Image: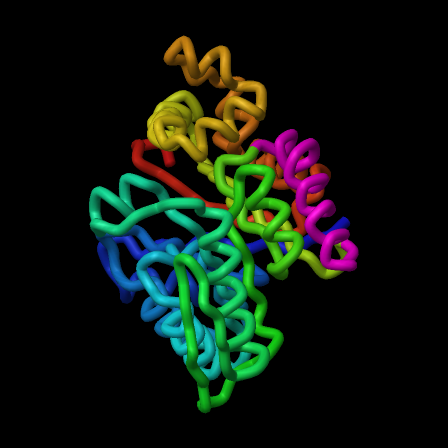
């Protein structure tokens, strides 16, 4: 069995304490550390630079950086520089984000997301592989060169939920990043759609990473832990991209009734003793996930 495992290491209140958690995760054998970019939080690329300076072996990844916050040429500059700083340990994960963020917070337009991501990836991959990009797109354009050190095969992963974006990940990316996707959704939807994209590009699944963030909580009060997790699931179920994916996962009836059952929570995360946490990681691996990323949460007295 593939025993690779990653860890989500968010900062929280103290960056110094987060750096210590990064060191701890490396010492425990984690293959990689991951962070997402939240709209109101620290800059993830700079935090990962701090993690990289404090560690020696562990890989570092973004899961994810929203593409509308950085032009693809600026993303190349950031990624290549961070990879250089960390001795070739960086993995770049990017995603579309959500309409509420892109339009309501930033005043931009989120239109034709698959087209936007295809143009973005075209510029990004050309910049990394060739050191230059020439692309006139409807949403992203670049006529530009990068002259500093770069790793041409720096892994680029794509956050995807719907069929067309999953196929695009298979076609143009090195992996897919998943969140709130059950093992059943990975097996029945993610893998077939990614494989279709790989076949379009004349590639197989070998070497393609299926990275699933797995919410986990080691706790002596599972009921309280589930209540914390239930609020997280409700929040994501209110976002259209996630809701469509959850409906396709078999949760449509209970979500339409305003319910989030314990059974649904147990499909999406591991809450309870060590056996419960190990079991959810095992189920993601068996479904085809090549790299489970454990995302610990607390928020209650028993955690």
Quarter assignment of residue 111: top left
Q: Which region shows up in magenta?
A: 182-204
Q: Nearer the viewer, residue 41 or 205?
A: 205
The residue positioned 72% from the left and 61% from the top of the image is 207
Q: Main secondary structure of the magenta part?
A: helix
Residue 52 image point, x, y percent: 43, 74
Q: Is residue 268 magenta?
A: no
Q: Is residue 187 magenta?
A: yes
The residue positioned 53% from the left and 54% from the top of the image is 158
Quarter assignment of residue 153: bottom right
Residue 54 image point, x, y percent: 40, 75
Residue 243 image point, x, y percent: 44, 27
Q: Nearer the viewer, residue 169 or 266?
A: 169
Q: With respect to residue 13, does 150 lie above or below? A: below
Q: In the rendered image, is residue 29 in sight?
A: no
The residue positioned 73% from the left and 47% from the top of the image is 195
Q: In the rendered image, is residue 174 in sight?
A: yes
Q: With respect to residue 233, does 68 lie above or below? A: below
How are the residues colored? rainbow
Q: Nearer the viewer, residue 176 or 225?
A: 176
Residue 181 image point, x, y percent: 54, 35
The residue positioned 45% from the left and 90% from the top of the image is 148
Q: Residue furthest top?
A: 257
Q: How many marks?
A: 0
Q: What quarter of the picture does the C terminus occupy?
A: top left
């Amino acid at each position: 069995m593939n025993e690779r495992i990653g860890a989500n290491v968010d900062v929280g209140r103290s960056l110094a304490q987060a750096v210590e958690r990064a060191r701890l995760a490396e010492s425990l054998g984690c293959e990689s550390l991951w962070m997402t970019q939240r709209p109101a939080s620290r800059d993830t690329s700079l935090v990962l630079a701090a993690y990289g300076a404090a560690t020696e072996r562990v890989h570092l990844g973004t899961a994810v950086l929203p593409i509308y916050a950085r032009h693809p040429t600026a993303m190349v500059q950031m990624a290549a520089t961070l990879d250089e700083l960390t001795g070739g340990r960086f993995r770049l994960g990017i995603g579309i984000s959500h309409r509420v963020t892109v339009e309501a917070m930033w005043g931009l337009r989120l239109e034709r997301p698959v087209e936007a991501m295809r143009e973005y990836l075209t510029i990004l991959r050309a910049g990394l592989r060739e050191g230059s990009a020439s692309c006139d797109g409807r949403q992203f354009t670049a006529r530009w060169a990068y002259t500093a050190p770069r790793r041409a095969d720096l892994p680029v992963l794509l956050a995807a939920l719907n069929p067309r974006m999953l196929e695009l990940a298979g076609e143009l990316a090195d992996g897919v990043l998943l969140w709130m996707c059950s093992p059943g959704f990975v097996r029945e939807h993610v893998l077939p759609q990614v494989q279709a994209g790989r076949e379009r590009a004349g590639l197989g699944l070998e070497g393609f990473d299926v990275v699933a963030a797995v919410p986990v909580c080691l706790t002596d009060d599972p009921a309280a832990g589930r209540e914390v997790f239930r609020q997280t699931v409700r929040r994501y179920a209110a976002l259209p991209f996630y809701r469509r994916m959850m409906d396709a996962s078999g949760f449509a009836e209970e979500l339409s009734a305003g319910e989030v059952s314990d059974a649904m929570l147990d499909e999406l995360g591991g809450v309870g003793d060590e056996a419960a946490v190990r079991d959810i990681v095992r189920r993601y691996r068996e479904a085809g996930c090549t790299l489970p990323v454990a995302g610990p949460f607390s928020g209650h007295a028993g955690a």
